[in-house]
Amino acid sequence: MRLLHCLALCLLSLALSAPDAKADKRVALVIGNGAYRNVPTLANPTNDAVDVGAALKRSGFDPLIAIDLDQATMQETVLRFAREARGADVALFYYSGHALQFAGVNYLVPVDAVVRDEVDLRRLVRADEILADLQQAKNLRILVLDACRDNPFADELRRNVGQGRGVTVARGLAKMESPEGTIISYATQAGRTADDGNGRNSPYTSAFLEHIRDRDNINTVFQIISAGVYQRTKGSQVPELSLSFFGEFYLNGKPETAALSPAAPQADPCADAGDHWRSAEALGTLAAFKDHLVRFPTCTFVDLAKSRIAALTKPADDVKRTTAFDGTWIGKETCESRPPFAEGYYQYALRIKDGVLQAAFGDEGKPGSTIYDGKIETDGSASITVKGVIGENDPLRRLAGSSYQYKIALALKDSSGTGVRTETARPCRMELSKLAPQSPGANPGQADPKRATKRDDKSAVVAPEQRDGGQPRQTGSGLSCSAMRGRCAVACVSRGGRPDCASTACPRLEAECMSSGCWRGRGFNGCGLAKR
């Protein structure tokens, strides 16, 4: 009996002395999709998933490893993981396989997927929904996407969606914002593609397997993984890392600190490199990355620092491409009839300056107002956010004064472009054309002589207060372009011209005013303030 009692005490002592890292609940879902049926297969995702699952198990996780999932199985597996994440201390999702982005949303692709247009995207798994499931974990959430291979459905999407509806099918994945307590690690930067690899694993998974067992703070572990990928690919692949976890967490326990002795070697010159790199990444400035290079020229993150510096010091050609679409654009939008929405046609002027599209219609914040805002990428693609305030007689019977929002996916090229509304129930397509800049030698105070020789009373727009014996008068200066448009619209209605003149002629004249600072209608003309 005494022997059994001693044995029980020993076992209890061992249990109590086990590392804290094993005491918490850690769940993981690892998916490797490579055996695609309708597009070229990928060699490594199966190996990636098996090896990552084994490595996570050694780090105290209870991993669910899933290989080559079709649509139904992948959806069911993700739902199962969402339930497992409830109440877990740590939740990790790792995906290796094909993925794509469309209108700023990332999708993970099952092996039986066929993606012909935006409707088929509903069959895929949205990465932002996975990110939401991870938020159920208590302490730490990790999303790893080794899924930036080139989009195999890009050509089909461009044929059926991109050219006809103005959506640019971008490369790679879109960057997602990480909620607090979350780490998101991408195999490469947003909008770039990653290599599947020639060995057993992809370059990213190889670095992950090498360092996931490191006894470092979890933020440092993922920073070292990113640096390892950069080194393995000789700079051709730079992982994107979004860190919103600000505490300390050690997957494999804290490293032991050895006591210093007279014979101890000199301090490691790279000991503080990880902490300094985290600070530099948080600041994200050119000066911060240059400072890291000076302080730690031979340490782990030196190549990543050089990459960040190169990205922040764009060549003059890149800056020029950023502003290549600057100017005034006329947008002609046609909306299909879809109850309760009637068919509609709209035309308006949009201004792009320094590569950013911004426009405001109506009094900001008041019913009926609309604001457009979005950055134009160097290839002419853009996701424009449209925010508005609902006015009277809303087809959806929403309260007047409440807000709404949708997006417009644009594709600009040279002086023309197309667009399509997304994230909205109303299907609308847009055609855009850029106004040519006014000749510097033109006299802004005089009407266009070529236009003056043409007579078409139906298209003339004359403000009622500006008539004088049937002769148009020149307006005084100081009126904004939007005020001029208001007078133009009043004239259209009052004179009984073409039914659509307020929505066609007036926006065109306003756009010219925005471009040149002057208004040139046959009915009245003059120079005003080139602003809305």
Image (cartoon, rainbow, N blue to C red):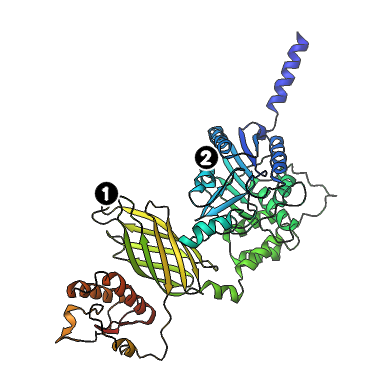
Q: Nearer the viewer, residue 213 or 33?
A: 33
Please give the residue where the numbered disc 2 appears in the rendered image: 133
**Closer to the observer: label 1 or label 2?**
1
Q: Quadrant of the N terminus?
A: top right
Residue shown at 58%/65% (left/top)? 285
Q: For the residue marked with disc 1, what is the amino acid? A: Arg
Pick whichever of labels 1 and 2 is earlier in the sequence: 2
Q: Secondary structure at mark 2?
A: helix
Q: Position of residue 96 (x, y in %)?
A: 65, 46
Question: Is 505 above or below relative to 278?
Answer: below
Q: Residues within 10 Å of mark 1 (few under 14, many from 20)?
A: few
Q: For the residue marked with disc 2, what is the amino acid? A: Asp
Q: Secondary structure at mark 1?
A: loop
For residue 373, side relative to residue 364 (left or right): right
Residue shown at 61%/32% (left/top)? 25
Q: Nearer the viewer, residue 182 or 383?
A: 383
Please give the residue where the numbered disc 1 appears in the rendered image: 397
For residue 386, side relative to residue 142 (left or right): left
Q: Nearer the viewer, residue 281 or 190?
A: 190
Q: Quadrant of the C terminus?
A: bottom left
Query: Is residue 212 visible to the viewer in this orientation of the structure?
Result: yes
